[in-house]
Each structure stands twice: as structure tokens, then as C-alpha cells.
Amino acid sequence: MKRITGMKLPMKASVFFMAFICYAGTVLAQSREAYLQKADQLYERADYFGAAQCYAIWLDSASAGIKNGLQASPFTVSQRKHKQQALKATTRSKAEAIWKLAECYRHTRNYEKMEQWYAKLQADHLQRYPEAGYWYACALRANGKLDEAEKTLNKFLQGKTTTALNAAARREWANIAFARQQLRRKSAGYEVSRISDINGYAASLNGEQLIYTAADTTGKGPYYNQLSKAVYLDGKIAGVEKMEALKVQDRHNGMSSLSPDGQVLYFTQWQTVEGKARSVIASSRLINGQWSAPVVMGTNVNHAGSNAREPFATADGKYLLFSSDRVGGAGGYDLWCIALPETTGKAWNLQAVNTAGDEQAPYYNTTSKQLVFSSDGLPGMGGFDLYQSAGTVEQLMPAVNMGHPLNSVRDDLYYVESNDGKNALLSSDRAVDCCLELYAVHQLAKSWLASGRVNDCVTGEEIADVQVQIKDSVKETAAINTVTTTDGRYYTSIENAAWLQFKASKEGYEPAGHTAYVQGRPDMDTLLLTPVCLTKIPMPVVDPGTETSVAWPVIYFAFDKATLSADAKATLDSLADRLQQEPSLMIDVKGYTDSRGTEKYNIRLSERRAKACVAYLEKKGVDVSRLHTEGLGKCCPAEEEGNNPVAAERNRRVVISSIKF
């Protein structure tokens, strides 16, 4: 269930389906053929809920009307008051009607009915609709029937199919294998339990204040999703109150996010236009205790001709993250970010985590530096899974699936953490066929055996008896001190690993360290930590003629650049003159980066910096055989960075020293 016409429909309201009642006055008095005519009309408008009702009746299903399992969509529920127009059926056979009914259930994510009707297609009409086998397997997986789903996919892959569906089937096969592995896990690391106090989804938290989305079923309809607020404390919800001031006629309200001071609320607005949901992001301000009328945000967020939705304001007040299908993304809905206030700049694409599928519902923890979001374009358990990516919003690491029980074989979205970081909320339809519901997440205490090594930056040899200090760079926890063994390794125990700071020191070596995000996966008992390398302190170099110490230069670089500055070239000019005067000198040129970026990228960047210096010296007449280059990435910082930009500047460097005299 990857693509849905218009806006995707994982956000299903928990209210009874009313569309059939609205249609009753126009179709009940007509012949059975009128149901087919009406079904085709609704199907063409992408009103899959209403179309399914009419197709089911036309097919003389034993389960019609409300019993068919349909419930209200947050995008499609509305009354039709216009007069019934002359209709013309376009469906030409019972097989086509079954196909369209199965498609209706696929689009509305009614997995039980989806399985039932695709199974019928596979049994009776597979030659005409070969793709039914693929969708039948998807429905089986969503209903937890992994073995049956795998067998169905294997059979599907043996037949004739399109390249795109073949690739999709192989991804689904991988999803099934991943889901099976996740469901076998013994140590989950989390407790996930349904919240029964309210009937809603897509929650946001600001301290104890909870804002969530639910269908407003008061009155006779039409029914729209609207925002409500409540107090969420110790896992209990109280003081529920509808946010009436945010209602706009004929529009739904969805996922919201409060500014850190609680004075601005960002939220999704959408309405159905020609059968498709059109969404924008709006904002409201708290003035004298009352929320102002919603205002649609500017074109820097709501890009012309595209949809924007699901905003999240970071706790430091600097950024607004959101999902959009605007041009310039990787495909489908991507995650975007814009600096606040949004009127002063342009949004940028979070390329490290976006895929050709859909990414949505971003949440970013500024303390632990983790982005959590939902995607259907990455390997997962099925439907939408939750993923996390470590780093700053400007530079993120590749996303990692958060695993079971946070994820299920259904849809899992709208993750948000409490202030203590140990509790969270998410929305999932794992227990029902109709809707997303709120679930509480509690992180269990867990420790891992952590192992790492310390080696020589030049030779790569392990170094024994190195003093290693490890501490959480975010939380105020006591440091762990350990010593490397004869093979250069160290072992310790780490609880709830996150951003860890490493420092290593030994006499005769320059002290070194780095900060890294360490993912403690609940299904693992051991963590392999990033190696630390130490550089030997060179003996003082003395010129026999002058008996004065030789000062070797350090070349500095701008962020993410390997371009020599004017000062760098002047320094290298002096070094070239000296190398010409002392032909026996052999030079070691080592490049480094600051702590931002992945290890692989920083190694390449540091190599480019070292080679830029060597290329310049070669132009000045220095034989390259006298120059040894090496890129060491973010290893061995000159200064511990933390949040200090000056220290980061000093770490973006090339260090030059002698090898032989």
C-alpha cells in the first residue's frame, strides 16, 4: 500500500461511515444498476469509501452497508445536497467490479476487506488482473499472515509482471523477512500500549499540553477532523477541550506543533477538491488567552502548486520541519526544513532521509539530536514504519528502522517524545482495520556491553594501556573510565546509548577524541564503538645550523571545503622554499575535518584537503615523491568541539610534519 491518489490516507478518523446514508435518498429508490452507476461516478472522483458501498451492493455482497467495515475518512466525508444527475456505468463486468471494490479497500486501507476481495480476484480472475497477486500478498502481510504472504509473493514473481511491480514485490518480500525477524525479538526495549482515554491520533506534546486530531461528530454532519487539546500527565489524559477557534468552514485540521513558548500553533489544513486532498500549513497565535483565526503560511512553506502538511517546530525555536510533494524532492512526499521565521529564507530538502516513496510526520529532538519520521520508501515491517536519523537538521545520518514494537505490520506514524525522553506517543492502526489510534511508548532501561579499540593514526597498530574516558555528551552523567588491553581494545557497559563523547590519552601521544551517535538496538547485547586513533608526539626538530626548533605549518579550511585560502597559499609558499633548500626533507601531510558528517564522507574530504596542499607544493617545484598524504577524517580533533564553532574551525585542518631528515 504505497501510493494513494491525492493525499495519503493513513490518517483515518474513528467515526462511523455516513456517506451511504447521504447517498440513500438518491440511490435506494433506484434499480440495482443505479448502484453500479453511482459506484463508477464515485470511483472516478476517488471517493473510495462511497464507491465501495455501492460496488458491494451491486455485487450482492452478504456484507453491505455499515457491516462492510467502512468508516469515515478524514478526507472524504461530506454530504451531497445537489440533485441526482443522469449516470452512466463504465464497469462492464463482474470481474471489473470486484477489481474496483478491491482497489477501494486498498486505497482506504481496510486490510481485512482488501484481503477478501484480492483473494477472490486471484482465485477467479488472475489472468485478467495479474497484479492482484501482489496486492493480495500485501494484504496478507498487513494482517500478520507472513507465511501466506511470502508464498503468494513467490508465486507472483514466477509469473509475468511489469518491471515496477516486480521490484515492488521484491521489496515487499524483504519487508516480510524483516517483519518476521523483528517479531521474533525477545528484548524489545520498549513497552507500547493503547491509550483508551480519547479517540484520536497525530498527537503533539509541549510539556503536559497535548494537542491531537479527531473527527468532530457533533451535529448531523458533514464531519471534519479538528484539533482538541488536553492535559497528558503520568500516562493519563484529562481536560479535553475542542479548539473551536481554529475551525474553518469546509476544511479539516490535522497534525499540529506548538512553538517552544506555546504562543504559536502550526498545523495542517486540508480539503477535498475533485476527489483529492489539498493541504496547506496554517498558523494561529495565542492572544490574551485565545487562539487567533488561522492564517495560511507563506509560499516559502506552502509552495505554489504543491501540498504541505505535518509541521513540527523544533524545541530551540530555530526550525520548522514539514512534509511536502513540492518539486525538487526525491519523489512523493519528502521532508523539508525552513529556518524560522519562515519569511526570511527558503526551505531545503532533507536529502539524507528522503526516498522515492513518501516521508512524513517529522519529529526532531534537539537534545539527543535525533530525527524521527515515518516512511514507506525504506525497508520496514510494512505500510509506514518509524525511522530515526542522528545529526543536526543541516546534516543527518542515514535513517535506521526503529523496529518492533514501535513498528508493526500496519501503519505507524506521528511519533513525539515527552520532555524526559523516556516516554513517547505514536499513532498506529495495528489493532483495528478502520483508524489510527494513540499509543503510549515507554522506554525500558537496558545496558549493552560496549567494545572499541585505539590504534596508531599512522601505522594502524593497536595501542595498549590507553586511558579511555566515555561520557554522555548530552545528559549530565558520570564518566566511564577504562584502559585498553594488549590488543588495543577496551570493554565497558553502557546504558541507553545515545551521543557519547570519547577521550583517549597516553604518554607520548597527542590526546584525541570524538563525539558520535551510538545506536543501542534493543535486539542486540553488544555495541561496537567507533575506533579512536592517536598520533605520536614528534621529537623536537632542530636545525643543526641554527639549533632552533622547526615550526611546521597547519593549514585551515572553511566548512565542507578543500579550497586553499590566500593565507594557506602564503604558508605553503614558505614551506616550498624550505623544501627546495633542504632536499633531504620528507613531508607527512595529514588532513582532518570537524565532527560533522559521516565517517566515510569526512575521510574523503580530509583526503581532498591533503591532496590540495600537495598539488600546490608540486606546482611550486616540490617533487611529490617527497610528500606523503593521508586523510584521517574527524579522527583526532585538535580541540573538543561540543557546540563551539571556533573549535570546529581549528579541527578543519591539514597538519604538516617531517618524516625523514
Image (cartoon, rainbow, N blue to C red):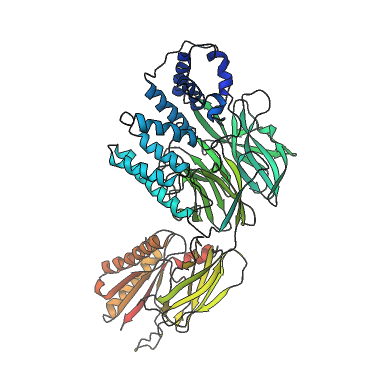
Give above or below for 566 relative to 303.
Answer: below
Q: How many marks?
A: 0
Give above or below for 245 relative to 565.
Answer: above
Quarter of the figure that contains the N terminus = top left
Which residue ends up furthest to the front in the rendered image? 62
Place of residue 41 in the rendered image (x, y in percent of width and height, measured from the top left) = 46, 19
Quarter of the figure that contains the C terminus = bottom left
- Res 247 quadrant in image: top right
126 relative position to 141: left or right: left
Residue 7 visible, this angle: no
Place of residue 17 in the rendered image (x, y in percent of width and height, measured from the top left) = 58, 27
Of residue 564 and residue 325, the one placed in the foreground of this image is 325
Place of residue 187 in the rendered image (x, y in percent of width and height, measured from the top left) = 53, 60
Residue 657 visible, this angle: yes
Give above or below for 620 relative to 304.
Answer: below
Of residue 603 and residue 491, the one placed in the foreground of this image is 491
Residue in the picture at 48% in, 37% down = 111
Of residue 243 and residue 80, the one placed in the foreground of this image is 80
Place of residue 486 in the rendered image (x, y in percent of width and height, measured from the top left) = 43, 83
